[in-house]
Image: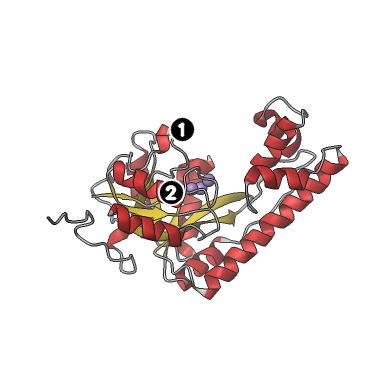
Amino acid sequence: MIYDLHSHSDRSDGILSPQALMSRARAQGVSVLALTDHDTVAGLAVARQAAAVEGVTLIDGIEFSSQWGKGGVHIVGLGIDPACAVLQEAIARQQRARDERAQAIAGRLAKMGVNEPLAGARNLAGGPAVGRPHFARLLVEQGFVRDVSAAFKRYLGSGKSADVAYRWPPLEEVVAWIHAAGGLAVLAHPAKYKLTRTRLRGLVAAFAEAGGDALEVISGQQAPGLASELASLAERYGLAASCGSDFHSPDQPWQELGHFGTMPDHCRPVWQLPGFPAVPVQTTPVQTT
Ligand code: MN
Ligand code: MN
Ligand code: MN
């Protein structure tokens, strides 16, 4: 059985609709899929209907942005109740923070001569979740820079003229939101923060201290040896182990649904923790004649 416990739909920065995501999951042999869009649960209801049609077990999830020291980190919630009031309030708060940041960035860009930056970025985002990549594309469109990476280098990157620093809520707070909604908190893709070994150990220790439940030991196609290193870290701090593709788009084969290595033997999988939603033994619909 393949568990893929980290994926995105077009309700955040993914490309596929929740329906298309579910049918791709089935085609890739995934039995259990968590939809974990950034700071939103908007895709879960549609995903649930599609999951029933496809014979895939859906785990209701979310991926929250959080702050650790100077950097942002991501915490996945698995098995959350999307209707939970604490969770809803947290989502609204994250959304307001993104909006305020977008308005501040737009204000700076307008002063530099960019035409209608907020409307332009919203249009490119196709929804309310406007981020720096959308402003970067707008700067390319309006001819300020040649490409997105130049937009970051010259305007939007850390310390540049249109960079607006934002501090996300701390680990304890995000873990508490997830627990209030009945979910399990997983520290996502620990290797993506580009921390030294000592700092990574510090982050995992802080996450465990904050009440976190599991560490994402596998995130898509990753360097050989990394899984067992992360598994040892998880074990050392009393955390279970999770795995997922972090799928966003069919164009990124290194993050394909269900395509990743197996969990090291000594791991305690997150789906064996009390609190993880029950998964039916047989998920493929039985054909009757
Ligand atoms: Mn993303
Ligand atoms: Mn992430
Ligand atoms: Mn993700």
Question: Could you tell me which residue is drawn at 21 percent across and 56 percent down?
Answer: 285
Q: Amino acid at mark 1?
A: Asp
Hey, which quadrant is residue 137 in on the image? top right
Dot 2: what SS?
A: loop
- The mark closer to the camera, 2 or 1, is 1
- Circle nearer the N terminus (2, 1): 2
Q: Which mark is residue 88?
A: none
Q: Residue 39 in the image: state x and y as whole percent.
A: 55, 57
Q: Residue 170 in the image: state x and y as whole percent.
A: 59, 61
The foreground one among 117 and 208 is 117
Dot 1: what SS?
A: loop
The foreground one among 176 and 196 is 176
Q: Is residue 278 above or below residue 107?
A: below
Question: Could you tell me which residue is drawn at 46 percent across and 33 percent down?
Answer: 251
Q: Where is mark 2, residue-wise? A: 7
* Render colour scheme: secondary structure
Q: Where is mark 1, residue-wise? A: 251
Residue 157 appearing in the image: no
Q: Amino acid at mark 2?
A: Ser
Report whether 105 appears left or right of 40.
right
Question: Could you tell me which residue is drawn at 62 percent across and 47 percent down?
Answer: 126
Label 2 beta carbon within 8 A of ligand 3: yes
Q: CA distance from mark 2 to mark 1?
A: 14 Å
Report whether 12 appears left or right of 27.
right
Q: Bin the neighbour count of mark 1 within 10 Å (Cα to Cα): few under 14, some 14-19, many 20 and up.
A: few
Q: Bin the neighbour count of mark 2 within 10 Å (Cα to Cα): few under 14, some 14-19, many 20 and up.
A: many
Outermost residue, left direction?
289
Residue 127 appearing in the image: yes
User: Do callouts 2 and 1 mark residues in contact (Cβ within 8 Å)?
Assistant: no
